[in-house]
Amino acid sequence: MQFDDFERPAWGVVSPREGGGDLGLVRDTIKKEQVIKEILACQEDLKAMLDKVQTVQKEVDKLVSGNETLQMYIDNLTVQMAKRR
């Protein structure tokens, strides 16, 4: 049995016979580390945006509640004014 009969691993490890050598392995590893760092940075950005969205949604909910209260007050005043006429 020869080693050439095996398939290349999923992470792209290249045997020296295929021309990649250790340098190819190092390049692949560095690229993968960079991609992982970018993914983690994007996840942190998404978490920050989600926090901001949740904060804004709470503010919107408060404003909606305040508007409903004001509308009820206006409606009550309108009814009272109509009764006086």
Image (spheres, grey):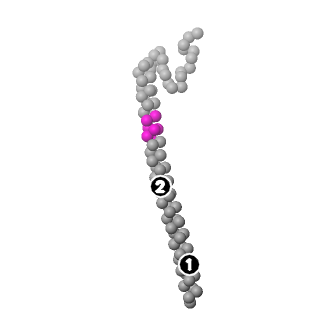
Tell me which residue sits at (50%, 63%) in the image: 62
Which residue sits furthest bottom? 85
Please provide percent x and percent y for residue 29.
Answer: 44, 27
Answer whether residue 37 is magenta in the image. yes
Secondary structure state at the residue bearing disc 1: helix
Q: Amino acid at mark 2?
A: Thr
Q: Is residue 28 above or below residue 70?
A: above
Q: Which residue is mark 1?
A: 76
Q: Which residues are magenta?
A: 36-42
All told, the count of numbered labels is 2
**The image quarter in which residue 5 lies:** top right
Residue 9 lies within the magenta run: no
Number of other residues with Cα within 10 Å of mark 2, as a class: few under 14, some 14 to 19, many 20 or more: few
Amino acid type, callout 1: Asn
Q: According to the image, label 2 marks what residue? A: 55
Label 1 Cα crowd, 10 Å radius (few <14 / some 14-19 / many 20+): few
Q: Earlier in the sequence, mark 2 or mark 1?
A: 2
Query: In percent of the image, x 54 and y 80: which residue is there?
Result: 77
At x 55% / y 81%, what residue is drawn? Answer: 78
**In which quadrant is the N terminus drawn?**
top right
Can you say which quadrant of the picture contains the C terminus?
Answer: bottom right
Task: Please provide percent x and percent y for residue 22.
Answer: 42, 19
- Where disc 2 sits, the SS reads helix
